[in-house]
Amino acid sequence: MEIHTIGFTKKSAAEFFGTLKDAGIRRLIDVRLNNVSQLAAFAKRDDLAFFLRELCDADYVHEPLLAPEGNMLKAYRSGDLEWDDYERQFLNLMSERSVEQAIDWDHLLNRPSVLLCSEPGPERCHRRLVVEYLGLTGINLDAIHL
């Protein structure tokens, strides 16, 4: 199964929504812990859902089971937690949450979908870790990082 991933930072609204439209995305799965931050500009929950519907004919789903815990994210962003430790903790968290069983993946991914978080690239981003974790559990996804 194919899944796309994207971050919204360092992208204009035109670039972000144009990329989604060009990729044929019909569902955006928001994997951020805080999807209403004022710093998110066009990517705040309600605005994002509106723009997706109007510009891309796509729907919006917030899936907090695929988000890190607040203290984990804060420690990483402040530099108190190195990436390798953050990665290990986040993978353990998804295992504890049994996200491979807790989410109806066939339904969630029944149309061209993209995982959204804030990081501009997938290298140090939990959206990539979600895809890798699911692969380890037998849900094989081919990731296309936009």
Image (tube, helix red, strand yellow):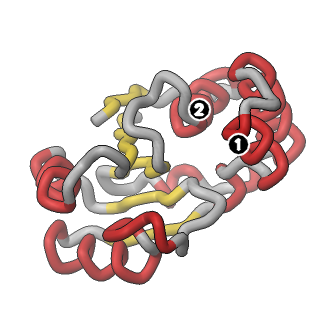
Residue 47 versus residue 11: which sits nearer the camera?
Answer: 11
Q: Give the vertical position of 12 relative to 44 (above or below).
A: above
Residue drawn at the location 84% of the way across and 50% of the way down: 71
Q: Position of residue 121 (x, y in %)?
A: 39, 31
Contact check, label 1 and label 2, Cβ < 8 Å: yes
Would residue 28 be found to the left or right of residue 140 on screen?
Answer: left
Residue labelled with disc 1? 100
Residue 107 versus residue 57: which sits nearer the camera?
Answer: 57
The residue most toward the right is 96
Would residue 18 be found to the left or right of residue 86 on screen?
Answer: left
Give the spatial CA distance, label 1 vs label 2: 7 Å
The residue most toward the top is 84
Q: Give the residue type at disc 2.
A: Ile
Q: What element carries label 1?
A: helix
Q: Is residue 3 visible?
A: no
Give the mark nearer the N terminus: 1 vs 2: 1
Residue labelled with disc 2? 139
Q: Is mark 2 on a helix, strand or loop?
A: loop
